[in-house]
Image: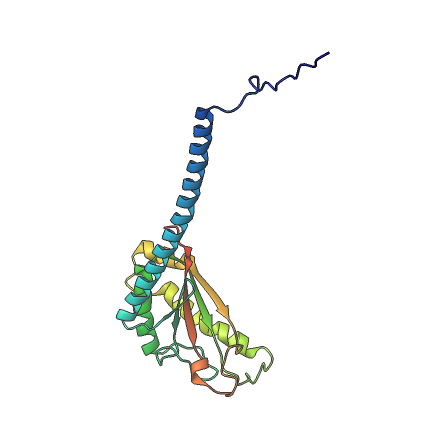
Amino acid sequence: MELELRQDDDSGIGWPSYVDFLTAFIFILLLLVSALMYFASGDIEEQEAQIRIKNDSNDFMDHGVPNIIVDKKIIIQLDNGKIVFSSGANQLTPATREFLNKIGALIARHPDCGGIEIKGSADRRPVKNDPEFGNWHLSAMRAESVLRYLYLCEECSYTEASRQQIRARLRLSGQGDISADQLKLDNPSDRRVDIILDCGEINAH
């Protein structure tokens, strides 16, 4: 008896058609294009942010306000003779107030940076009546003097809208003598206030 070999018949299997393959290919291609566009838009936004921060920094420079860019922050280091305090003091001099008028007007022109941190510092000379914590307190009092001036400033060319925006963005910190020159007890450049514009935190205005 002869056995009849049966050939496999795959005619009943639902193999994808050419149209199915083409549809799947187009779908995957669209996913890839969308992903590339998403990442590219992030890069473009980052580049635009860096350009904006650089332009803001240059504007301050052009108006006689030295600053540096660290990450997405513009740091105005006020230890250039314009805002340096006497040992143990937190009072603003007339020259300091005049310089803050300029800084306030410039900050008002650049509302995109969300946070305005006013950070005070002190040298290593201990405060006589509070040697353990006096420098922290003194650094915070210096920062408060600058913050209060910018908050209430009548010579900063604020509009009513920019005044409210600046008031909402102001923050205060005192760092004592943590980052002060550790080789000197009495270093004028450590008795200062820094103004830090956080341009990574966008102000919703």
Number of residue marks: 0
Residue at x 59%, y 82% (from the top left corner):
131
**Residue furthest out toward the front:** 1
- Residue 94 in which image quadrant: bottom left
- Tell me if 119 is positioned left or right of 44 in this view: right
- Residue 178 in which image quadrant: bottom right
- Residue 72 in which image quadrant: bottom left
**Residue furthest out toward the right:** 1
Above or below: residue 133 compared with residue 152: below
Residue at x 34%, y 76% (from the top left corner):
96
Asked whether residue 112 is in view, the answer is no
Q: Which residue is nearer to you in this view: 102 or 14?
A: 14
Asked whether residue 36 is in view, the answer is yes
Q: Which residue is nearer to you in this view: 79 or 8?
A: 8
Residue 120: image x %, image y %?
A: 47, 73
**Residue furthest out toward the top:** 1
Residue 81: image x %, image y %?
A: 35, 81
Residue 146: image x %, image y %?
A: 41, 70
- Tell me if 151 is positioned left or right of 10 in this view: left
Above or below: residue 12 compared with residue 120: above
Residue 44: image x %, image y %?
A: 36, 52
For the N terminus, the image quarter is: top right
